[in-house]
Structure formats: structure tokens, C-alpha cells
Image (cartoon, rainbow, N blue to C red):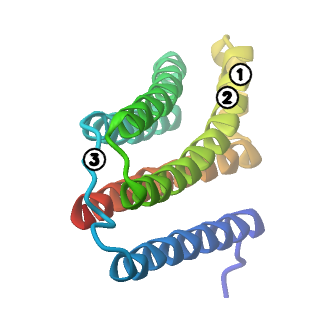
């Protein structure tokens, strides 16, 4: 029987818990629709479309960074990690811009309630992005400290370092997929 990596297992359990939380919030959103007339009559901000694309591209750049890391192309790895960080920050900025668009919409009581749910869902997702950015920054700083090929190579063959990178990639792909599901849900329900 293969030994299970404890950090990966803990991350999987945390992701499972986050997934359940978002599933519960989406279920509650659907339940509230039936109780409040015109509950979900709100226009989803157009910037959310662009931010979704930005999030998907950030997942791709992180994947490409990992591929470069595995084949000892450390400069490309550092550049793609930097791009991923920038795209993560850009995503947050676009979400906040979307919030401004939501706030500018005429708001009766039903619209304010719907808007509150959108703030809650996207705000919790932003929290997950910020958490991912924290760890991406740590890994990026570690990569910048090891500019020489030898230092980068020694770092790259160390199993704990490989694990750290694999865990953040796994998590980042999760928050990407999570946003796609949330955005599709908001489009479907509004």
C-alpha cells in the first residue's frame, strides 16, 4: 500500500471543505430564490467575463511554469511565476471593479439581497485567491533567491520543494475551477 503524503491529504480535505461550503451557499441561494420575488434579477458585470479568462490564463501560466521547472528552465519558471502572480492580482482588481458595477445598479430590496449573495460568493473566492497568492509569493521569492543555475537545480531536486510547488499548483487549479463553477452558477441563476 502506497503511503499517502500528509500535506497533500490535508490540502485535499481543505479543498473538499471549501467545496462543501460553496455548494451550501449556492444551495441556499437557490432556496432564497423561491422565497423572494425578483430575487435574481440582476445584471452580472461584464468584467466578470474578462476576469474568468484572466483566471484561466493564470492557471495555464502556472502549469507552464511547472513544466519549465521540471526541465530545468529556471528563468522561464521565474518569469511565468511572475506572470501568474500578476494575473492573480489582476483578477482581484477585476472582481472589485465588478463589485462597483453591481453597486451602481438600481437597487430595490430584492436586488440588494441578490447583490449581497454575489458579494459573498465572489468575496469568499477572493479570500481563497489571496491565500493562494500568499503561497505563490513565497515560492516566487524562493525562486528569485536562487538565480544561479546550480542553486536553482539543487532547489528543484529537493523533494520538499517539489511538494510545495505541486501543492500550490493543485490549489491554484482548484480556485480556478471554483471560479468557473461560481461564475457559471451566477450566469445560470441570473
Residue 85's place in the image compared with 10, above or below, is above
- Judge depth for marks 2 and 3 and give the one in front: 3
**Mark 1 and 2 residues: CB-CB less than 8 Å, in contact?**
yes
Residue 103 image point, x, y percent: 42, 37
Q: Residue furthest front?
A: 108
Image quarter of residue 91: top left
Q: Give above or below for 170 relative to 87.
A: below
Give 116 or 71, whichever is nearer the viewer.
Answer: 116
* Numbered badge on residue 137: 2
- Work out whether residue 47 or residue 166 is closer to the camera in this orientation and state it: 47
Question: Image point 72% across, 49% down: which residue?
Answer: 159
- Mark 2 closeness class: few <14, some 14–19, many ≥20 residues within 10 Å: some
Figure disc tally: 3
In the rendered view of the protein, which quadrant contains the C terminus?
A: bottom left
Residue marked by disc 3: 44
Q: Are marks 3 and 1 in contact (CB under 8 Å)?
A: no
How much space separates mark 1 and mark 2, taking CA atoms? Answer: 6 Å
Q: Earlier in the sequence, mark 2 or mark 3?
A: 3
Residue at image position (66%, 73%) is: 13
- Crowd class of label 3 (few under 14; some 14 to 19; many from 20; radius 10 Å): some
**Residue placed most toward the observer, 169 or 108:** 108
Q: Secondary structure at mark 3?
A: loop
Real-space Cα distance between discs 3 and 1? 36 Å
Residue 179's spot in the image, x, y percent?
A: 41, 53
Amino acid at each position: 500500500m502506497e503511503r499517502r503524503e500528509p500535506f497533500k491529504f490535508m490540502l485535499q480535505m481543505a479543498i473538499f471543505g471549501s467545496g462543501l461550503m460553496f455548494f451550501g451557499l449556492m444551495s441556499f441561494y437557490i432556496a432564497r430564490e423561491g422565497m423572494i420575488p425578483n430575487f435574481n434579477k440582476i445584471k452580472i458585470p461584464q468584467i466578470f467575463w474578462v476576469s474568468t479568462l484572466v483566471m484561466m490564463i493564470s492557471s495555464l501560466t502556472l502549469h507552464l511554469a511547472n513544466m519549465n521547472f521540471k526541465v530545468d528552465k529556471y528563468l522561464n519558471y521565474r518569469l511565468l511565476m511572475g506572470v501568474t502572480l500578476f494575473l492573480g492580482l489582476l483578477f482581484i482588481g477585476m472582481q472589485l471593479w465588478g463589485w462597483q458595477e453591481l453597486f451602481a445598479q438600481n437597487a430595490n430590496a430584492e436586488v440588494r439581497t441578490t447583490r449581497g449573495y454575489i458579494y459573498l460568493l465572489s468575496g469568499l473566492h477572493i479570500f481563497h485567491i489571496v491565500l493562494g497568492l500568499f503561497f505563490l509569493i513565497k515560492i516566487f521569492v524562493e525562486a528569485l533567491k536562487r538565480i544561479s543555475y546550480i542553486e536553482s537545480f539543487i532547489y528543484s531536486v529537493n523533494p520538499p520543494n517539489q511538494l510545495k510547488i505541486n501543492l500550490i499548483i493543485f490549489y491554484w487549479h482548484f480556485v480556478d475551477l471554483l471560479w468557473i463553477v461560481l461564475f457559471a452558477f451566477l450566469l445560470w441563476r441570473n
